[in-house]
Image (tube, helix red, strand yellow):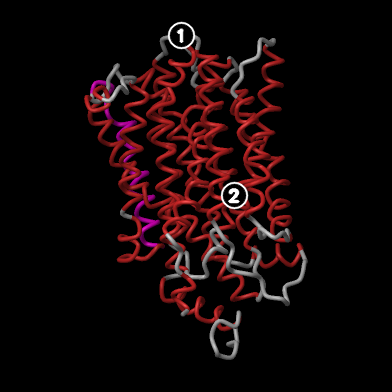
Amino acid sequence: MKKERAKISLLEKVGYSAGDGALNLFFQTFVNYLLFFYTDIFGISAAVAGTMFLVTRIFDAVTDPIMGFISDRTMTKYGKFRPYLLWLAIPFGVIGFFMFITPDFSDTGKIVYAYITYTMMMAVYTAINVPYAALMGVITPNSIERTGVSSYRFVAAYLGLLVVTGLTEQFVEFFGNGNEQIGWMWTMGLYGVVAAGLFLFTFFTTKERVLPTKEEKIDLSTDWKDLLANKPWVLIAGATVFQLMYVVIKGGSSPYLVDYYLAEHTVSFFEAIGIGSSKSSFLTSGALATLAGALLTKYIASIFDKKKTYVWSLALSAGFCLPFFFLDQSQDELIYISNIISGFFFGPVSVLQWAIYTDTADFGEWKFGRRATGLIMAASLFALKMGVAIGGALTGWMLAYFDFQPNQVQTEESLYGIIFLAGIISAIAGICGALLMVLYPLDGEKMEQIEVELEARRGELDEPSPTV
């Protein structure tokens, strides 16, 4: 009976995964194109954009834990977390559309507009992503089943990545007909409509099953104390900061690496299916490799466990960025191959990241007798967004430091800065994240023990509650 109750249907797995597909239509655009959009299309400097990425996170520092606290205390007929998918699906799409409008303002006016729309987008992103991430922790109490759900989730995420990397420039060209500002506006409008529909699909196909124990009290200070004493969470959160720094620095520098450093080059397969631009072929080949790695995650993690798979996957993915720096411009084929191998090894990382976070929520309930899934996911998203912020800021600042000038032939100094970012700085960030997770204490055996004991406490087994 226990296994039957823990099982999740295929429809629900697909339905839950749709939410991450929606998020990634925008998140992957932010990672791979946003800095490029702001410098080369919108018309603000790399230094200004980099500073904006960091400053906006001050606002996130407040909204993330508040959203976690609110969602943990939400009580509706739809549950704690699902309602936010219904309430915020349309606002998410609308604000995402306005963020990519290029107004006919002065330079100062553009900067103000960028700050306002970017901050609003991060706010609604937090408000829908915190409950969405927490939802995976309550649709099943089974840790192994959650890993399977996470695999579906990140297949959808990587499909979103493929759409962004493979089709965005084609959509921009189609909608803009030579005007990239108009093209970007309508492309992101399309993504907004699709994202809203996917969020609603997630809402209608999922169910919350893990309920908090009756003795849990509403106490934010205790929640925070428990969170900071949760060593597994602290380690994965720290690794997440470095992991997202790696992703953003690598992704943010890739368009510059291709457009300004490499010779004009495409892969014949992508030319055959209509993806002819250098940026699209470079990003899409890496994304396809990442998807392949993600599809193998459950099998690999069943052999080596989540921790070892995460550590080695992140370290190897980061290591294969080093050729970006050491190979010559003329060796573009080898740079493409390195990017593809790096993408493949990164596949399991994000899949396991969120499955690990839900394990830390179980650990926190097991150790402290209180479950705060929303706060854990909110704080985890804050760690993620700190990595995005620091990575984005570093990318913008370093491009400015090496005197990058958009839409011009670059100097030797600026070209060196681009490959230094893509090859060295990104690799350092990824390897630091892997090293932190070496210290992570939860393995498969420990999680099985925790799961059994929690089920006993929740009354799912006819056993007395164990002594912690």
Q: Is residue 250 left or right of residue 364?
A: left
Q: Quadrant of residue 251?
A: top left
Span colored in magenta:
307-330
Q: Secondary structure at mark 1?
A: loop
- In which quadrant is the C terminus drawn? bottom right
Q: Quadrant of residue 158?
A: top left
Q: Residue at x 47, y 35 (%)?
A: 249
Query: Mark 1 or 2 closer to N-term?
Result: 1
Q: Is residue 91 left or right of residue 265?
A: right
Q: Give me the disc on residue 381.
A: 2
Question: For mark 1, does the 10 Å Cα neighbourhood hold few (<14), some (14 to 19), or many (20 or more) residues?
Answer: few
Coordinates of residue 198 in the picture (x, y in percent): 52, 42
Residue 171 on the magenta segment: no
Residue 309 on the magenta segment: yes
Residue where numbered disc 1 is placed: 178
Q: Residue at x 68, y 55 (%)?
A: 68
Coordinates of residue 53 in the picture (x, y in percent): 61, 32
Q: Nearer the viewer, residue 398 or 284?
A: 284
Q: Nearer the viewer, residue 290 or 228?
A: 290
Distance between mark 1 and mark 2 Cα atoms: 37 Å
Q: Residue at x 46, y 8 (%)?
A: 178
